[in-house]
Image (spheres, rainbow, N blue to C red):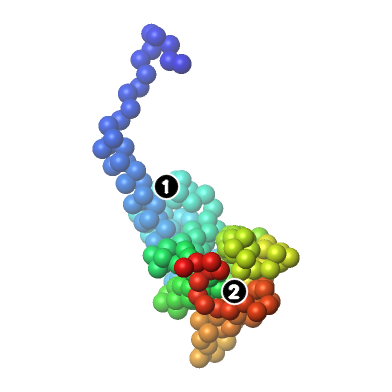
Amino acid sequence: MTPRHIEAEPEPPEALRDGRNRNRALRRERVYEAAIQLFVEQGFESTTMDEISERASVARATVFNHFQRKSAFLDEWSARRRRRALDEIRAARLDDHSFKEVLTRYMIELADSSECARNETVALIGSAIRSTDAFGNTYLAREITELVGRAQQAGEVRAEVDAAQAGLIIATSYFGILERWITDPPPFNLRVALLGMLDLVIHGMIPSGSGSSGRRPGAS
């Protein structure tokens, strides 16, 4: 509670708060874009926070205000890719579609993100995998685990399947295939490789005799 003899500092007008938030978001985006450009040009390991601040035309402290460590740029880069994939799934209104169809669309969107920005993916994915412990409980593994869990509740996945293990298998397989796509000589169809992996894993998860109508059981 504020003492009576001291007036509380007035809240800034809403328009002013919105303006500050917008400017902060713009600065953060400028810092992020500068970092990604430098990672592509000279490599993640070779880029310093000082170089990022210089490229973004902001103070070094501003860079650290938005990204406290260099690997945070990789976290953001990976999160944006996953977010775009999930946004496309929502836009396609696949809520009542089968688990396999939703996860297939997810992999397609991730593949397209990599193929549309190959130079960026090649420059960043190796460092991203190392910094996020790709063979552990990554964000991608957790998101897929959640999808598997919902599919179990809908009867699309066998009850005895360990959802967390399934999520981990799919996520680590995704990272492994992505590394092959980067290192193997072309042609390497990333989408085909990812969907082949997904089909193989899902086949071992679904109840015997299940069809693939594209709709969840009971959906009209």
Q: Of residues 102 and 18, which is closer to you in this image? A: 102
- Considering every residue shown, the one lying at the far top of the view is 5
Question: Which sits in the foreground, 37 or 129?
Answer: 129
| Residue 17, above or below 68 | above
Quadrant hosting residue 210: bottom right
Judge from the rendering whether residue 11 lies leftward or rightward of residue 157; answer left or right. Answer: left
Q: What residue type is labelled 1?
A: Thr
Residue depicted at 50% across the width and 75% down the height: 214
- The image's mark for residue 174 is 2
Q: Label 2's element?
A: helix
The residue shown at (38%, 65%) is 91
Instruction: State which quadrant residue 88 falls in.
Output: bottom left
Label 1 crowd bin: few (<14), some (14–19), many (20+), radius 10 Å: some
Q: Real-space Cα distance between discs 1 and 2?
A: 34 Å
For residue 77, side relative to residue 13 (left or right): right
Q: Where is residue 12 in the image (x, y as percent from the top left)?
A: 30, 30
Using the rendered view, name the quadrant where residue 53 is placed.
bottom left
Q: What residue type is labelled 2?
A: Tyr
